[in-house]
Amino acid sequence: MIFHFTLLLWSLIFSAGLWFVAQGEVVLGWSWYLYTIGPLALISIIAARRVTHRTVDAAIPMLLSVTAPVLLSLIDAPLERELFVMIAGVMYYLGLLALYRLHYAPTDQTAQSMLSVAVMSAVFFYYAGIYGFYVNFNFPIWGLMLLFLSGTAAASYQTFVVRGRKERRRALSYSLVIGIIMGEVAWALGFWPFGYLTTGAIALVLYAILWDIAFDVFHRELSIRRVALRILFFLGLILLLLFSTPWNILA
């Protein structure tokens, strides 16, 4: 099943809210972010409760709700904003659909794959948006690290707990470890001469490596050969990003 009317309705509500944000005047300030993020976050909590009857499942929709307005504020072209709203809406629906299917069939591999795609998209939006906020505002590096830690841990916990509901404490431990490592990565990224999209992509690749290893260990499916091949592949992606991106050294 890839179509569900209730999930589509909530996704359209989210997309409509984000579209109204895109059409309005962007005023870069704390009040603007609070007024835009608040309603979207409330929509995500209600949607998760209606879909799976569990507030904990709001982590991924909430991450999109928090990040989408931040990343949207960094996009200038109207057409690109509308395209971003469409992409965010699709990822929102995909995340809700995966959570719905996993709620009734925790071993559904297709739903797990859909959730992974939604999580990786949400995490990329999160890293790019938060780093863009850090670059454009007088935001402390410790705040960047804390946001990387908390967002990463929340997203990771969501992927672990859907299949291991009886091992929530273990899932939380794994998620916190990944979050702490990505928090340290955020400190290093704070000194890199790249834009927010490149930095977000590199952070996502590093997160994917950590999450892939932790996910296999959590489900006791670890293969050293597979891990080595995936690490080489992901490192190749990072090198490709570094060589194809202009290095803008900021004074």
Image (cartoon, rainbow, N blue to C red):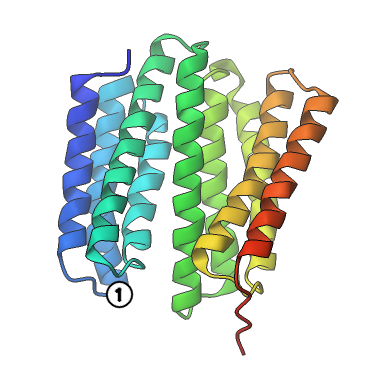
> How far from the left and from the top, in percent, is residue 47?
26, 32
Q: Quadrant of residue 21?
A: bottom left
Identity of the residue furthest to the front in this view: 244
Q: What element carries label 1?
A: loop
Q: In this view, does 172 lie above or below 132?
A: above
Image quadrant containing the C terminus: bottom right
Q: Which residue is drawn at 70% across and 66% down?
A: 188
Q: Is residue 220 above or below residue 15?
A: above
Amino acid type, label 1: Leu
Relative to residue 57, is residue 224 drawn left or right?
Answer: right
> How far from the left and from the top, in percent, is residue 20?
15, 56
Relative to residue 73, is residue 160 drawn left or right?
Answer: right
Q: Residue at x 58, y 25 (%)?
A: 168
> How far from the left and from the top, in percent, is residue 250?
60, 85
Q: Nearer the viewer, residue 140 or 21?
A: 21
Q: In which quarter of the image is residue 230?
A: top right
Q: Which residue is drawn at 31% across and 37% down?
A: 90
Can residue 55 be seen here?
no
> How far from the left and from the top, in percent, is residue 193?
63, 75
Relative to residue 145, is residue 216 drawn left or right?
Answer: right
Q: Residue at x 50, y 61 (%)?
A: 197
Question: Alpha-carbon neighbours of circle 1 within 10 Å: few (<14), some, or many (≥20)?
Answer: some
Identify the residue under disc 1. 28
Image quadrant containing the N terminus: top left
